[in-house]
Image: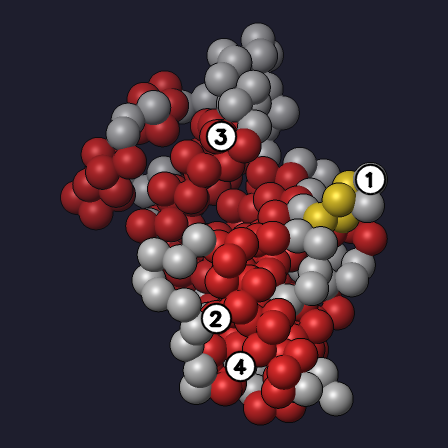
Amino acid sequence: MKKMVLFAGILAICPFVGSHAAIPSKEIMNPKVLEILNLPTENRVQVTRTSTQDFYKDYIAVAFSEAQSMRLRWRALMMAAETRREKATPDLLKAATHKQWFLRNAALVALSEFNNSEAQKLAKNLLKDKALVVRSAAVDVLQVNPRPEVRDLLWEEMSEKRNFRNKESLWIRAQIVEALAQKPSDHELKMFTKLIDDKDERVQSAAVGGLEKLTGVSLGEAKTPRQKLIGLWQEYIRREKLQL
């Protein structure tokens, strides 16, 4: 349930969503469930662990209800997963194909907690999702087990149009490089050296991490400004002819 805090980050990116009250509807929701969903995270988890009542169906009903706010629906799906854990997989996979990006996101986050094998499969598909936040969550899931085929997918995403806006690099590209730089493979040296000249300084900085691990070289000092450090690496690459 610790990953539920990721939702705060999502709201920071899209502060205008989830802040509205539920839309009036003829749907009748269990008032106890709505009360639980409005509790702080720790209290919601405590209710799940100590309550003798099974609100799973109620949580699912809220999650798929168009009458409820984004915040409640996201929380409801996460609570459903917390309640049934791996057994919630069918409903989570259903949510993973929903038209609403926040349900796709919640489904992936929940699966990564309770059914990692399914989460890995889903993340490969959602890496191409139209919603940037969902793609970012997919990177988080995939970097946990970066097998060769996963690394290939991540490298491919670096040049995909969906990760640019008006030819400007989106932050997910730096996130991808940071993931790849955790345990870089020897054959990726030229790929990391190429990124040191990327137009996105965030990508350049992330590439430095991979280069340090692959070359065993550390340039500059701990407090060296980012731009200066990147310049040192650009000079080192040219001098050592690492791109040849």
Image x and y of residue 14, in percent = 56, 28
**Of marks 3 and 4, the one in the foreground:** 4
Q: Which residue is mark 3?
A: 11
Q: Which mark is residue 184?
A: 4
Mark 1, residues whose alpha carbon is within 10 Å: few (<14), some, or many (≥20)?
few
Residue 177 visible in this rendered orientation of the protein = no
Image quadrant in which the C terminus is located: bottom right
Mark 1 vs 4, N-terminal side: 1
Q: Which mark is residue 116?
A: none
Query: Please, which colouring scheme is shown?
Result: secondary structure
Residue that protrudes farthest toward the top in the picture: 24
Q: Which mark is residue 209?
A: 2
**Of marks 2 and 4, the one in the foreground:** 2
Mark 4, residues whose alpha carbon is within 10 Å: few (<14), some, or many (≥20)?
many
- Circle 1 SS class: loop
The residue depicted at 53 percent of the width and 68 percent of the height is: 232
Mark 2 vs 1, N-terminal side: 1
Q: In this image, 42 relative to 6: left or right?
A: left
Mark 2 vs 4, N-terminal side: 4
Q: Which residue is mark 1?
A: 166
